[in-house]
């Protein structure tokens, strides 16, 4: 067992982080406060600050659910549904993943959609035409982290990694529960991601480095918290 300590622990006593926690920790500019990502991470996961969902997460979840399972039909117009119905799902939805980094530490995730043999995996994203560019950059490694899990489970790297980006219209930044300000546009962008063993090894190492950094910071936080209670 490692001596890593993280803010999140499952019922079996294992520590875990999510991909969003990893990116939050590494971000140079955080989403909610515009400060370094590790500062906003600590506010959220150490101090329990709840920034809430402006509406982005709810909208993205409803779009994915409609594409894959035709749920939340009442949340969309006929035109929005027409756009989403052009996407053919792969058929294996919301696969829970546990990518083990250490004997008691893993990355928890959910693959949005995949073929039954897991050799093609897909991530659904909603984005404007400008904001979608983040999923084309080299530092977008969410699908790589899922590919590592597939390799862990099957011994193989998936043949295809794909981001399916659905055009999002509207803006709810800085608001609360403003999902109704967002809608589905008419564009769909498919972007294949290329990976290999060298890249996967680097992604694993980068996540593990973040885990150690978070652990060190969390241990310090617990020590300070204990002292203030005395």
Image (cartoon, helix red, strand yellow):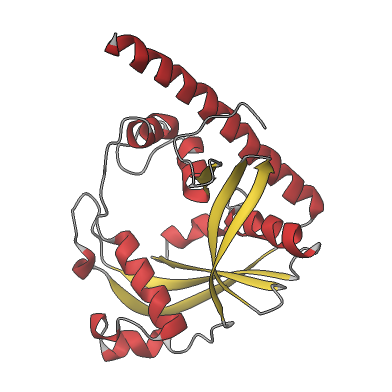
- Residue 13 coordinates in the image, percent (x, y): 53, 40
Residue furthest front as drawn: 12
Residue at the image position 34 percent from the left and 73 percent from the top: 62
Residue 171, placed above or below residue 223:
below
Judge left or right: residue 180 versus residue 47: left
- Residue 76 can be seen, yes or no: yes
- Residue 195 can be seen, yes or no: no
Residue at the image position 65 percent from the left and 30 percent from the top: 2
- Residue 177 coordinates in the image, percent (x, y): 19, 59
Choose between 132 and 226: the one closer to the eye: 226
**Which quarter of the rendered picture does the N terminus lie within?**
top right
Residue 121, placed above or below residue 36:
below
- Residue 191 coordinates in the image, percent (x, y): 59, 69
- Residue 7 coordinates in the image, percent (x, y): 44, 35
Residue 53 falls in which quadrant of the image? bottom left
Choose between 128 and 65: the one closer to the eye: 65
Residue at the image position 58 percent from the left and 34 percent from the top: 211
- Count up the numbered dots: 0
**Which quarter of the rendered picture does the C terminus lie within?**
top left
Residue 150 falls in which quadrant of the image? bottom right
Choose between 124 and 48: the one closer to the eye: 48
Judge left or right: residue 127 versus residue 204: left
């Amino acid at each position: 067992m490692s001596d890593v300590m993280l803010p999140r622990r499952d019922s079996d006593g294992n520590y875990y982080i999510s991909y969003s926690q990893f990116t939050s920790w590494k971000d140079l500019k955080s989403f909610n406060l515009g400060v370094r990502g590790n500062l906003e991470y600590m506010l959220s996961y150490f101090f329990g600050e709840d920034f809430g969902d402006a509406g982005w997460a709810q909208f993205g979840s409803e779009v994915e659910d409609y594409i894959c399972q035709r749920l939340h039909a009442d949340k969309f117009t006929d035109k929005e549904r027409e756009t989403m119905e052009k996407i053919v799902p792969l058929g294996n939805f919301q696969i829970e993943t546990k990518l083990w980094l250490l004997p008691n530490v893993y990355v928890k995730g959910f693959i949005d959609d995949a073929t039954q043999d897991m050799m093609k995996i897909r991530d659904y994203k909603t984005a404007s035409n400008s904001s979608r560019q983040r999923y084309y950059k080299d530092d977008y490694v969410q699908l790589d982290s899922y590919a590592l899990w597939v390799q862990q489970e099957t011994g193989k790297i998936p043949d295809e990694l794909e981001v399916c980006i659905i055009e999002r219209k509207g803006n709810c930044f800085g608001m609360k529960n403003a999902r109704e300000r967002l809608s589905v546009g008419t564009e769909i962008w498919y972007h294949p991601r290329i990976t290999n063993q060298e890249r996967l090894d680097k992604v694993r190492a980068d996540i593990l480095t973040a885990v150690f950094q978070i652990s060190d910071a969390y241990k310090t936080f617990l020590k300070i918290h204990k002292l203030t209670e005395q």
